[in-house]
Image (cartoon, helix red, strand yellow):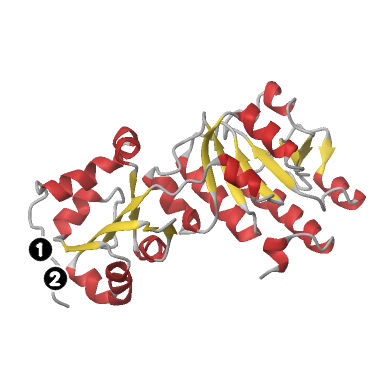
């Protein structure tokens, strides 16, 4: 495959330097660009658009990766992205992983205004409040996508969803569903409730049991789950904003579930209840 541009030998190239800076949050925010690494993320980015604009604007690929993933490189070019053949040294310099896979894309921000999320009348939403670990944030996003959620909302106190680790942990799901960022938790809860969504806090110390709620048939309506910080959970003032605080029952001897596992259980419980009620567009539509 002939290179679209001369091979980028030096990590000091201005294009490489610009991409490398996107590993830092302040540069991502200033440029409204982020990095997507590996074939899965790059493929999803190449097929994604924000309005009339392609999400993927630039792709760096080693010669080996360009040959191995020729279809992805072709999709990137078809999307209008600038494709650069790069040395392994350049890819290692841009990448934030220990073992880069030879493809690094530069993408436009793709977050959705919170008002647009509400206007779509979502039936299943994951709300991340004070979630600080990027790996957990990305994994919850992936769980929400898999469960058929129609949006993910990150509060203003949560991690940057465009953190490279969060993007990797989402395994492409960042490109699949609307994501609203920087929303104050009070505004998020009030907006969702005004849109007819029941807001539930997931907390191990909750006074309601998830199994009991399912048995009572209370889970079939539009629902937003609020997930808190990995270490200390949800503060009392956040729990007080919600309609109910629900715990995932622990039937064995484990002390607790980690954030991503609890999120998966809660989201799938709602998805199943909504499907049984015949009301979940994102699940029944598959």
Give the class, few, some or many, for how many residues have Cα within 10 Å of label 1's Cα (few <14, many ≥20).
some
Can residue 167 be spotted in the picture? yes
- Residue at x-position 29% and y-position 62%: 101
Residue 35's place in the image compared with 24, above or below, is: below
Horizontal and vertical percent position of residue 281: 71, 62
In the image, taking residue 176 as reference, residue 248 lies left or right, namely right
- Residue at x-position 16% and y-position 44%: 17
Q: Please, what secondary structure does the residue beneath circle 2 have?
A: loop
- The C terminus lies in which quarter of the figure? bottom right
Residue 211's place in the image compared with 247, above or below, is: below
Observer-nearest residue: 30 or 71? 30
Horizontal and vertical percent position of residue 117: 60, 46
Name the residue beneath numbered marker 2.
Answer: 3
Q: Which label sits on residue 7?
A: 1
Horizontal and vertical percent position of residue 253: 73, 44
Can residue 200 be spotted in the picture? no
Residue 241's place in the image compared with 73, above or below, is: above
Give the class, few, some or many, for how many residues have Cα within 10 Å of label 2's Cα (few <14, many ≥20).
few
Q: Are marks 1 and 2 in contact (CB under 8 Å)?
A: yes
Horizontal and vertical percent position of residue 68: 27, 75
Q: Which label sits on residue 206?
A: none
Observer-nearest residue: 125 or 68? 125
Furthest toward the front, the residue is 52
């Amino acid at each position: 495959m002939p290179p679209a541009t001369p091979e980028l030998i030096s990590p000091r190239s201005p294009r490489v330097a610009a991409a490398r800076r996107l590993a830092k949050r302040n540069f991502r925010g200033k440029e409204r660009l982020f990095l997507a690494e590996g074939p899965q993320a790059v493929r999803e980015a190449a097929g994604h658009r924000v309005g009339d604009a392609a999400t993927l604007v630039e792709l760096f690929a080693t010669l080996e990766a360009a040959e191995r993933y020729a279809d992805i490189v072709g999709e990137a070019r078809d999307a209008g992205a600038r494709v650069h053949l790069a040395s392994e040294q350049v890819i290692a310099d841009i990448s934030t992983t220990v073992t880069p896979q030879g493809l690094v894309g530069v993408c436009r921000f793709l977050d959705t205004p919170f008002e647009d999320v509400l206007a779509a009348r979502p039936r299943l939403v994951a709300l991340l409040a004070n979630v600080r670990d990027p790996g957990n944030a990305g994994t919850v996003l992936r769980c929400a996508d898999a469960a058929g959620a129609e949006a993910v909302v990150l509060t203003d106190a949560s991690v940057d969803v465009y953190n490279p680790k969060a993007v990797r942990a989402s395994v492409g799901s960042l490109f699949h569903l609307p994501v609203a960022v920087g929303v104050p938790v009070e505004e998020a809860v009030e907006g969702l409730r005004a849109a007819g969504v029941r807001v539930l806090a997931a907390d191990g110390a909750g006074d309601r049991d998830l199994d009991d709620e399912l048995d009572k048939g209370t889970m079939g309506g539009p629902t937003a789950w609020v997930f808190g910080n990995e270490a200390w959970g949800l503060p009392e003032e956040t729990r007080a904003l919600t309609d109910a605080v629900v715990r995932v029952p622990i039937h064995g001897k484990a002390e607790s579930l980690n954030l991503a596992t609890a999120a998966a259980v809660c989201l799938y419980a709602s998805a199943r209840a909504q499907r049984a009620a015949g009301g979940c567009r994102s699940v029944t539509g598959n």
